[in-house]
Image: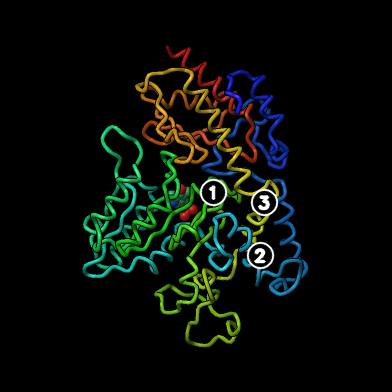
C-alpha cells in the first residue's frame, strides 16, 4: 500500500480511488461555521442522517394516514411483522443467524432484559466482570442488577483496569482475571469496543475464557456494531446488545439490537421479563394466560414494534449493505483511521502533550482515535469546532475523533490533521 503523505493532493488521490466515495452524497452533512459541509468526525456519538431515511418514515406516515389500525396487517410493510424485516441485515451486521437477533427498545433497556436472563447469581457464583470506567449507563445497569439480587455492588462487581502507565487492557490480563475468579464468576460483560479509548476487545478469546470457568459472556456493542466486523455466533458469545444511532446512523435515541446465541433459542425455561410481543404469535391475540416465548431473540420482545425508529434503521442498514457491508466498510475504516494516526504521529509531539490512547494495532481498535491532550485540551477542541471540525469531548481531557467510512473522506481527515498541526504550532 502507498505510504501516507500529509498533503491535500494525496488525500484527494485517495478519495478518487475510494470505492465508497459515492456514499458521502447519500447523507446530510451538517454545515460548518462557513456554511460549507463541516468535517464530521463524531459518528461514534451520533451518526449522520441518510437521505433515504425521510422517505422511509414518510412511507409509514402514509400507511398510518391511509390505513389507520389496518396498517398492522396491510400496506407495504405491515407493522405486525416489521421487526422481522430487520433480522437478516442485523444478523449479517453482527455475524449471527437471523433467529439470534431482534431489534427493539433502547440499549440500556435491552441490557437489563439480557442481564435478567444471563446474570443468574448463586450463593457461590455471583461475580460480574466489567471494564473499570465503563460507560455510565452500563455501570448503573450492573449496580442495579446486582442489588436486585440482594448483593452489594462492591462485592459482586469486579472491574478490569489497565496496568499502571497503560491506557488499555491486555487480553492476557482479562483472561487471567477470568481464570482467577473461576467458579465465583457468573457473568462477563464488556464493551465490544471501549467507548473512551476506542479499544476493540478480543471477544473470541474472552468468551472462551469465560465459558471455561462456567460464566456467561455478553458484550455491549454500542461502539462496535457498524464499526468493526463481528462474528458473535462463531465466537460463541452468549448475549449482546447495541444501539443504532452511533455507527448505524439510525437517528437520535433510535432503536436497539439484541443478540442471543442459538443455543438459547428454544429455552422457555430461561428466566426473563416477558411481554406480549415475545409470545408465540399463533395465539398472541387470544389474550390467554401463560407466557410461551417465541423462538430465539424475538422471544425477548416486550412491546409492539416502534415503527418510526425501525423505519429509519431499515433505511440506514440498507445503505450499509449497498456499500458492501462490514467487510467493505472496515477496509476503508482502517485506511481512514490509519491516515489520521499518521497525521498525528508525524507532529512528533511528546506523549506529555498529545497522546493517542487508542491501540496502535488496527485489529485492536475500531475507527475512533482517542487523543489525550495533557494541557489545554478544551482549547484544542474549541479550536477544531471553530474550524468546522466536529469532534467529541470527554472529561477530563480526551478528544475522540471518529472518521466513518460511509460519509467521511480522506480529505476530511487531512483537514482535521492540518487543523491540529496549526493549533499545536500556535500553542508552542
Ligand atoms: C452510547 C452508549 C450507551 C447509551 O445507552 P442508551 O440506552 O442508548 O441511552 C450505553 N452504553 C454504552 C457503552 C454506550 O456507548
Discs 1/2, front: 1
Q: Which residue is mark 2?
A: 85
Q: Find numbered disc 3 in the image and state the secondary structure of the residue it sits on.
A: helix
**Residues packed near mark 2 inside 10 Å, few (<14), some (14 to 19) or many (20 plus):** some
Q: Position of residue 168 (x, y in %)?
A: 36, 39
- Nearest the camera: 360 or 132? 360
| Quadrant housing the N terminus | top right
**Mark 1 Cα-neighbour bin, 10 Å: few <14, some 14–19, many ≥20:** some
Q: Residue 22 versus residue 205: which sits nearer the camera?
A: 205
**The CB of the residue at mark 2 lies under 8 Å from ligand 1:** no
Residue bearing the label numbered 3: 321
Count neighbours of disc 3 (C-alpha within 10 A) and say few if under 14, some if 14 to 19, many if 20 or more.
some
The circle drawn on residue 229 is 1
Q: Position of residue 109 (x, y in %)?
A: 45, 61
Q: Give percent across and percent down for residue 363.
A: 47, 41
The C terminus appears in which quarter of the rendering?
Answer: top left
Q: From the image, state whether disc 3 or disc 1 is nearer to you.
A: 1
With respect to residue 322, does 278 lie above or below?
below
Is the CB of mark 3 within 8 Å of ligand 1?
A: no
- Contact, CB < 8 Å: mark 3 with mark 1? no
- Residues under numbered marks 1 and 2 in contact, where contact means CB atoms less than 8 Å apart: no
**Closer mark to the observer between disc 2 and disc 3:** 3
Amino acid at each position: 500500500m502507498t505510504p501516507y503523505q500529509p498533503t491535500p493532493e494525496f488525500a484527494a488521490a485517495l478519495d478518487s480511488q475510494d470505492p465508497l466515495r459515492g456514499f458521502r452524497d447519500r447523507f446530510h452533512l451538517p454545515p460548518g461555521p462557513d456554511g460549507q459541509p463541516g468535517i464530521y468526525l463524531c459518528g461514534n456519538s451520533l451518526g449522520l442522517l441518510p437521505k433515504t431515511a425521510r422517505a422511509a418514515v414518510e412511507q409509514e406516515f402514509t400507511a398510518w394516514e391511509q390505513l389507520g389500525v389496518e396498517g398492522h396487517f396491510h400496506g407495504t410493510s405491515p407493522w405486525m411483522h416489521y421487526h422481522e424485516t430487520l433480522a437478516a441485515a442485523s444478523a449479517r451486521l453482527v455475524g449471527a443467524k437471523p433467529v439470534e437477533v431482534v431489534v427493539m427498545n433502547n440499549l440500556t433497556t435491552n441490557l437489563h432484559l439480557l442481564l435478567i436472563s444471563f446474570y443468574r447469581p448463586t450463593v457461590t457464583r455471583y461475580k460480574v466482570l466489567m471494564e473499570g470506567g465503563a460507560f455510565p449507563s452500563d455501570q448503573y445497569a450492573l449496580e442495579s442488577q446486582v442489588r436486585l439480587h440482594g448483593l452489594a455492588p462492591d462485592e459482586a462487581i469486579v472491574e478490569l483496569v489497565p496496568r499502571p502507565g497503560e491506557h488499555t487492557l491486555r487480553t492476557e490480563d482479562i483472561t487471567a482475571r477470568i481464570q482467577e475468579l473461576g467458579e465465583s464468576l457468573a457473568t462477563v460483560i464488556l464493551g465490544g469496543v471501549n467507548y473512551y479509548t476506542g479499544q476493540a476487545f478480543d471477544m473470541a478469546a474472552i468468551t472462551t475464557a469465560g465459558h471455561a470457568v462456567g460464566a456467561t459472556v455478553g458484550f455491549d456493542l454500542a461502539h462496535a456494531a457498524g464499526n468493526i466486523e463481528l462474528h458473535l455466533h462463531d465466537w460463541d458469545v452468549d448475549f449482546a446488545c447495541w444501539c443504532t444511532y452511533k455507527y448505524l446512523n439510525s437517528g437520535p435515541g433510535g432503536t436497539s439490537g439484541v443478540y442471543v446465541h442459538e443455543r438459547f433459542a428454544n429455552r422457555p425455561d430461561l428466566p426473563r421479563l416477558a411481554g406480549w410481543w415475545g409470545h408465540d404469535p399463533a395465539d398472541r391475540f387470544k389474550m390467554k394466560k401463560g407466557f410461551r416465548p417465541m423462538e430465539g431473540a424475538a422471544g425477548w420482545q416486550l412491546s409492539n414494534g416502534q415503527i418510526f425508529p425501525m423505519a429509519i434503521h431499515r433505511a440506514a442498514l440498507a445503505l450499509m449493505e449497498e456499500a458492501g457491508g462490514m467487510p467493505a466498510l472496515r477496509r476503508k475504516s482502517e485506511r481512514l483511521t490509519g491516515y489520521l494516526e499518521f497525521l498525528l504521529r508525524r507532529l512528533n509531539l511528546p506523549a506529555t502533550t498529545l497522546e493517542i490512547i487508542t491501540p496502535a494495532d488496527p485489529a485492536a481498535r475500531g475507527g475512533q482515535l482517542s487523543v489525550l491532550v495533557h494541557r489545554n485540551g478544551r482549547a484544542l477542541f474549541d479550536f477544531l469546532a471553530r474550524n468546522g471540525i466536529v469532534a467529541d469531548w470527554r472529561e477530563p481531557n480526551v478528544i475522540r475523533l471518529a472518521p466513518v467510512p460511509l460519509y467521511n473522506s480522506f480529505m476530511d481527515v487531512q483537514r482535521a490533521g492540518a487543523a491540529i498541526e496549526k493549533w499545536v504550532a500556535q500553542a508552542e
